[in-house]
Image (spheres, helix red, strand yellow):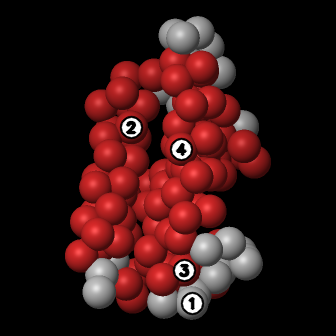
């Protein structure tokens, strides 16, 4: 079970990989949105780990995100999860404009909310 700092480290590693992908002008949008999703998971789970909650699958994680985070964050998490799954399993193409205007900003909201909660936790 990973703890808060381990999740934050993994999120940072994934963010480095995201920057590498961005250099290619998002030639691989399926991997791009998958990376966004994995970054989100680790920020969310960093906060959950503070509460000794360690989901191992989406069916465990989703209700915990709903329970511990505000609705806006939950909806952004669901957006990233759904688009990531669609691009991986349904092979649904992801529109680059949608990535830039909707999906990437969703990650920013998740990161900000997660860090705010982590930093204010006593």
Q: Which residue does the numbered mark 3 point to in the structure image? A: 49
CA separation, marks 1 and 3?
A: 5 Å
User: Contact (CB < 8 A) between labels 3 and 2?
Assistant: no
CA separation, marks 4 and 3?
A: 17 Å
CA separation, marks 1 and 2?
A: 28 Å
Q: Position of residue 19 (x, y in %)?
A: 52, 23
Nearer the camera: disc 1 or disc 2: 1
Q: Position of residue 120 (x, y in %)?
A: 24, 76
**Which residue, as the protein is rendered here, is positioned at the far top?**
24
Residue 24 or 89: which is nearer the viewer?
Answer: 24
Query: Does 106 appear above or below 43?
Result: above
Position of the N terminus by quadrant: bottom right
User: Contact (CB < 8 A) between labels 4 and 3?
Assistant: no
Nearest to N terminus: mark 3 or mark 2 = 3
Residue at position x 29%, y 86% from top? 122
Q: Residues within 10 Å of mark 3 (few under 14, many from 20)?
A: many
Q: Residues within 10 Å of mark 2 (few under 14, many from 20)?
A: some
Residue 20 or 103: which is nearer the viewer?
Answer: 20
């Amino acid at each position: 079970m990973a703890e808060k700092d381990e999740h934050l480290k993994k999120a940072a590693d994934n963010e480095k990989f995201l920057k590498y992908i961005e250099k290619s002008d998002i030639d691989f949008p399926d991997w791009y949105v998958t990376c966004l999703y994995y970054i989100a998971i680790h920020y969310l789970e960093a906060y959950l780990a503070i509460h000794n909650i360690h989901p191992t699958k989406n069916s465990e994680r989703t209700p915990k995100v709903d329970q511990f985070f505000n609705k806006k964050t939950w909806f952004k998490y669901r957006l990233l999860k759904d688009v990531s799954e669609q691009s991986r399993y349904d092979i649904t193409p992801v529109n680059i404009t949608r990535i830039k205007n909707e999906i990437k900003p969703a990650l920013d909201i998740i990161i900000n909310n997660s860090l705010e909660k982590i930093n204010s936790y006593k």
